[in-house]
Image (cartoon, grey):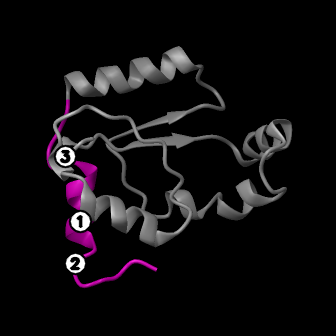
């Protein structure tokens, strides 16, 4: 969809390094706005339990890995921000984008490394 020129929103848990590596290989880094969606561990675990459709402990086991790469274009914290505030933060970023993008920086930093 993105390669065909469509704007897409991808919600992807980067639970393994190779998941980010795949995204870096597939997506044009200058057209990606990489949004870090954070939430405190306690809230993440509570939301997982309330959903009831995930293995217990999955959120906690992935908590540190999903942000291990450490670089985003913009970040939101759903533990303290509501959906509208998160959307406004991303919208504001879009009007003041900077380059190189997080995806460009991450591509450059992984030169010579492989995803695991």
Q: Quadrant of residue 7?
A: top left
Mark 2 and mark 1 in contact? Answer it, CB < 8 Å. yes
Question: Residue beneath label 3, please?
Answer: 3
Q: Residue at x 80, y 37 (%)?
A: 51
The first of marks 3 and 1 along the sequence is 3
How crowded is the residue under tag 3: few (<14 C-alpha within 10 Å), some, or many (20+)? Answer: few
**Magenta span includes 111:** yes
Question: Residue beneath label 1, please?
Answer: 107
Viewer-side residue, 10 vs 84:
10
Element class at badge 3: loop
Q: Residue at x 73, y 43 (%)?
A: 44
Q: Is residue 45 left or right of residue 40?
A: right
Vertical placement of residue 58 versus 99, above or below = below
Between circles 3 and 1, the one closer to the viewer is 3
Please count the marks in the image.
Answer: 3
Q: Is residue 4 left or right of residue 60?
A: left
Query: How far is the residue under mark 3 from the one under mark 1?
Result: 18 Å
Q: Residue at x 79, y 47 (%)?
A: 45
Checking the image for residue 71, the label placed there is: none
What's drawn in magenta, residue-wise? 97-116
Between circles 3 and 2, the one closer to the viewer is 3
Question: Residue beneath label 2, please?
Answer: 111
């Amino acid at each position: 969809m993105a390669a065909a020129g469509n704007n897409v929103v991808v919600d992807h848990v980067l639970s393994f390094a190779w998941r980010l590596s795949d995204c870096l290989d597939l997506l044009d880094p200058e057209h990606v706005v990489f949004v870090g969606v954070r939430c405190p561990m306690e809230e993440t675990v509570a939301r997982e339990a309330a959903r009831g459709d995930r293995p217990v402990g999955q959120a906690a086991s992935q908590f540190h890995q999903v942000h291990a790469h450490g670089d985003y274009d913009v970040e939101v914290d759903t533990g303290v921000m509501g959906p509208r505030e998160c959307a406004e933060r991303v919208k504001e970023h879009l009007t003041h984008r900077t380059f190189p993008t997080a995806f460009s920086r991450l591509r450059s930093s992984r030169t010579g490394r492989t995803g695991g």
